[in-house]
Amino acid sequence: MGGIRNRIRELRGDHSMTQQELADQIGVTRQTVIAIELDKYSPSLEVAFRIATIFAVPLEQVFQYQPASSNKKGS
Amino acid sequence: MANLSYEERSLYGVLVVNLAVYLPYLFLSRYSNSLTRIAGAMVLLMALQILSQAVIAVATRNRLQDERDKQIRLYGYRAGYIAFTGLVGTGLSLLWLWAAYGHLDPMRLAIQFLSVLFGTIVLADIARVVTQLIAHRRPV
């Protein structure tokens, strides 16, 4: 199963930051942060960059794209 | 309630007012209906919506709405539109059949038409709100 995974919960823990604090800094609601952390919602590119900027890490360290496994036999 | 965003509180407000006005209206107009009752229900619905939204806005300090709220709103409007078109088609067809088989007084057709239209609008709005509330708690 593919999709976009993220390390926001882990990074938030490293920075001792609550979901509400992160939400306030990136300008979204706490419910949106919860949905992003649970991989239930993929944020816009702008919000993704804001999150990476707050944690001072490159975008790819926050979000990882995992393509859906397409192991076709004989190809 | 404390865990709900402003958007969700606002939606619950709309849902409660819709149900609080439409269910008694439906109960009272089971056997007979009048233009006054339909107009009264519409005015009451609008007044209570304005009042409830004002109270929710005043009671909620953080009224932030973000990109996810906007996306969920679009899902809601789509569901509301589908419900509206489906209900209008069904409601008017039933009304036409009812009239065609002589079960409806032609003099009261306008009132029944208004009643169906009012019901359709309220039910479509409920469909919109419920879709949005579900989307707020599920993946979108």
Image (cartoon, coloured by chain):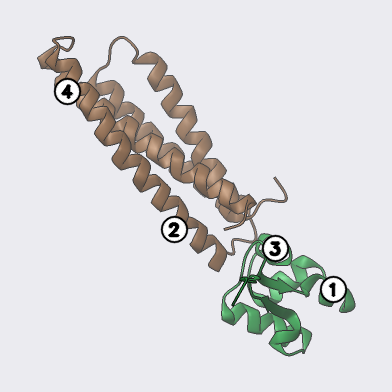
Q: Are marks 4 and 2 in contact (CB under 8 Å)?
A: no
Which residue lies at the image location 66% right of the left edge and 69% below the top edge?
A2
Quadrant of residue B101 within the rendered picture = top left
Q: Chain of mark 3?
A: A
Which type of secondary structure does the marked residue at label 3 adopt? Answer: helix
* Three-letter code for the amino acid on which mark 3 is drawn: Arg
Any idea which chain is the green one in this picture?
A: A
Same subunit, labels 4 and 2: the answer reads yes
Q: Is residue B123 left or right of residue B108?
A: right
Label 1 vs 3, first from the N-terminus: 1
Same subunit, labels 2 and 3: the answer reads no
Q: Position of residue B66 (x, y in %)?
A: 56, 67
Which type of secondary structure does the marked residue at label 2 adopt? Answer: helix
Instruction: Assess disc 2: are there few (<14), some (14-19) or many (≥20) residues with their C-alpha within 10 Å of its C-alpha.
Output: some
Which residue lies at the image location 62% right of the left edge and 78% below the top edge?
A47
Report which residue position mark 1 lands on. Answer: A10
Q: CA distance from mark 4 to mark 3?
A: 49 Å
Q: CA distance from mark 4 to mark 2?
A: 33 Å
Above or below, B25 relative to B82: above
Apparent colour of chain B: brown
Label 4 vs 2, first from the N-terminus: 2
* Three-letter code for the amino acid on which mark 4 is drawn: Trp
